Image: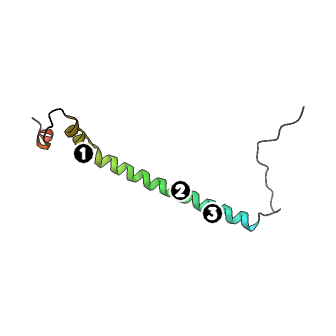
Amino acid sequence: MASRPSLKPKPRGKGGKRGSAAADDEQSTMAVAVRHAKEWSTMTMKAAKVAAHWGFIPLIIVVGMTSGDPKPSLFSLLSPV
């Protein structure tokens, strides 16, 4: 029966071979790309939160104006009576 390869990463000791300059450059490029993706997603989520917070009630008013069978006026939608 053949042995299976280990899924654990091999420990690196002090010293030893270093990666090539191209590999280091590629890793730094990937790190920058990941950082930009995290920043972009954070900004997007903050903008979506603000849009949902300030846009919910106007959305309900617009849906009420467009979906009513006898089209109500804006005043009749906003008045409590």
The residue carrying mark 2 is: 37
Of residue 65 and residue 2, the one placed in the foreground of this image is 65
Residue 33 point in image, percent of width and height: 58, 60
The part of the image, by quadrant, that contains residue 16 is bottom right
Mark 1 neighbour density, 10 Å: few (under 14) some (14–19) many (20 or more): few
Give the quarter of the image for residue 17.
bottom right
Amino acid tagged 2 = Ala
What residue is shown at x 76% (from left), y 48% (from top)?
9
What is the distance, in whole Å, between disc 1 and disc 2 at their CAs? 31 Å
Sequence-wise, the earlier of marks 1 and 3 is 3
- SS for callout 3: helix
Cα–Cα gap, marks 1 and 3 = 43 Å
From the viewer's side, name the closer residue of 71 and 33.
Answer: 71
Q: Residue furthest right?
A: 1
Q: Which mark is residue 29?
A: 3
Residue 35 in percent (x, y) is at: 55, 59
Mark 2 / mark 3, whichever is N-terminal: 3
Instruction: In the rendered structure, find residue 58 and report the number of the disc placed on it.
Output: 1
